[in-house]
Image (spheres, rainbow, N blue to C red):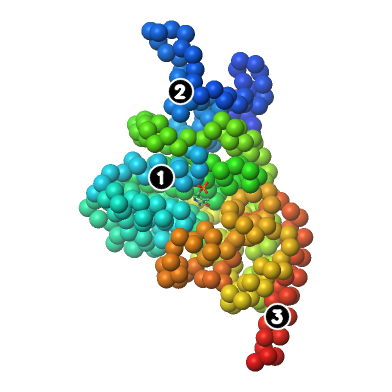
């Protein structure tokens, strides 16, 4: 049985880097050397200088390429380094059609940096294909998809976008951070470049910042390699090893967190003090069926809204188990406040236009017992109720 036939969870462990060919080590060795001795002046070895190639980083690059079903992977010092380097495939005069509730850092890169280099963009609600079509210009060279989106968990039809892109010879980027190849394989839906903040689910332990890019087309791979080497925002070997280790448990982590997320989403949806829950795993999510058809699961991130900012503040002050922090995709549950964290780069007006309210909170479900989390949320919601009663009596 070749590893091609293995199921995904087996491949996480038994891939081309399961053992080190030099020693048989079952953990990829961390190679710190920045330069490599050349034994022959006529022909140089595979590695010369570690920005251009490092065996530990390369192992991670091979593994992510294999898991995504691409031909070549690239590891960067952060998700933003991966995304920004991949944007350098574009040139002055090009135009990007991009999803409107994109990750805040990507929003900043596109609006504040790429514009200075003559790369234009149009933000659209990608769940509305008519809007996407209307945004296409003669110089549109790329589509940028993030699905499910952050923080509103809107689901974009990847296949529909890549079909449009192919018609006009444009490329499609897909940020696959939220679902990972465990649940979503954008190449199977026609994507050209898959991007990751490996800081999140892939590494999974809140202990490393890393980014990945994967391509399927070999020519595109050569261009991206040249950009990785030119720009130089490569991932260090120690961090590459941490991501490699995290990937081994991706399946068990994500399955468990997703199971809990479904339970918690249902609890929140039924609670009278929660105004709205955004989670593609809920049957009344507007793209629930689409999500089921293009991904193997809804993932472990959800958002929910309170009546107002005050209710949110009382909840946050009283909730005990999750950490309150930027980031997602970790073993511990993380609550974050998009308006002041991931989307702080957006003005209040821009956020409101996108439906990101100041009373919205995002939850990334970790590996705690879901009943403990529900119990904790229950008591914090009870505090919200008490506080609201006090306020009403004061009126
Ligand atoms: C965190 C994140 C990024 C940026 O990744 P960094 O590793 O923080 O640079 C990009 N996209 C999404 C969806 C993210 O959640």
- Tag shown at residue 387: 3
In this orientation, which residue lies closer to the viewer: 123 or 254? 123
Q: Quadrant of residue 354?
A: bottom left
Per the model, the C-alpha gap separating discs 1 and 3 is 45 Å
Which residue occupies the foreground of this view, 373 or 188?
373
Count neighbours of disc 3 (C-alpha within 10 A) and say few if under 14, some if 14 to 19, many if 20 or more.
some
How far from the left and from the top, in percent, is residue 19?
Answer: 63, 22
Residue beneath label 1, please? 84
Residue at screen point 38% across, 7% down: 42
At x 58% / y 77%, what residue is drawn?
Answer: 308
In the image, 113 versus 134, the foreground residue is: 113
Residue 236 x, y percent position in the rendering: 54, 33
Q: CA distance from mark 3 to mark 2?
A: 61 Å
Secondary element type, mark 3: helix
- Mark with earlier residue (3, 2): 2
How would you rate the neighbour count of disc 1 (Cα within 10 Å): few for under 14, some for 14-19, many for 20 or more?
Answer: some
Query: Which structural element holds mark 1?
Result: helix
Label 2: which secondary element: loop
Please tell me the numbered disc located at residue 49: 2
């Amino acid at each position: 049985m070749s590893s091609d036939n293995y199921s995904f969870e087996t491949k996480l462990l038994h891939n081309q880097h399961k053992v080190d060919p030099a020693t048989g080590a079952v953990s990829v060795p961390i190679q710190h050397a920045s330069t490599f001795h050349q034994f022959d002046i006529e022909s140089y070895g595979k590695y010369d200088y570690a920005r251009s190639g490092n065996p530990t980083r390369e192992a991670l690059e091979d593994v992510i390429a294999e898991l995504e079903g691409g031909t070549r992977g690239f590891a960067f010092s952060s998700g933003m380094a991966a995304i920004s380097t991949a944007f350098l495939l574009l040139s002055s005069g090009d135009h990007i059609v991009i999803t409107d509730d994109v990750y805040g850092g990507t929003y900043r890169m596109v609006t504040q940096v790429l514009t200075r280099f003559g790369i234009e963009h149009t933000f659209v609600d990608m769940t509305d294909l008519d809007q996407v079509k209307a945004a296409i210009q003669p110089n549109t060279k790329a589509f940028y998809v993030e699905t499910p989106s952050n923080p509103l968990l809107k689901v974009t039809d990847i296949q529909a976008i890549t079909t449009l892109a192919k018609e006009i010879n444009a490329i499609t980027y897909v940020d696959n951070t939220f679902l990972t190849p465990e649940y979503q394989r954008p190449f199977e839906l026609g994507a050209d470049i898959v991007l990751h903040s490996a800081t999140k689910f892939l590494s999974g332990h809140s202990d490393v910042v890393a980014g990945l890019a994967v391509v399927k087309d070999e020519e595109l791979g050569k261009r991206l390699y040249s950009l990785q080497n030119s720009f130089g925002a490569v991932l260090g070997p120690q961090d590459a090893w941490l991501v490699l280790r995290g990937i081994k448990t991706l399946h068990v982590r994500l399955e468990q967190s997703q199971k809990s997320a479904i339970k918690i989403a249902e609890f929140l949806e039924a609670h009278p003090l929660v105004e709205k829950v955004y989670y593609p795993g809920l049957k009344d999510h507007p793209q629930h069926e689409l999500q089921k058809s293009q991904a193997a699961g809804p993932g472990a991130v959800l958002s929910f809204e309170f009546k107002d900012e005050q209710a949110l503040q009382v909840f946050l002050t009283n909730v005990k188990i999750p950490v309150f922090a930027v980031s997602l995709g970790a073993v511990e549950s993380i609550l974050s406040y998009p308006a002041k964290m991931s989307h702080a780069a957006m003005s209040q007006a821009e956020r409101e236009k996108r439906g990101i309210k100041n009373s919205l909170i995002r939850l990334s479900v970790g590996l705690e017992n879901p009943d403990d989390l529900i119990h904790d949320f229950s008591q914090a919601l009870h505090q919200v109720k008490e506080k609201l009663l006090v306020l009403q009596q004061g009126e």
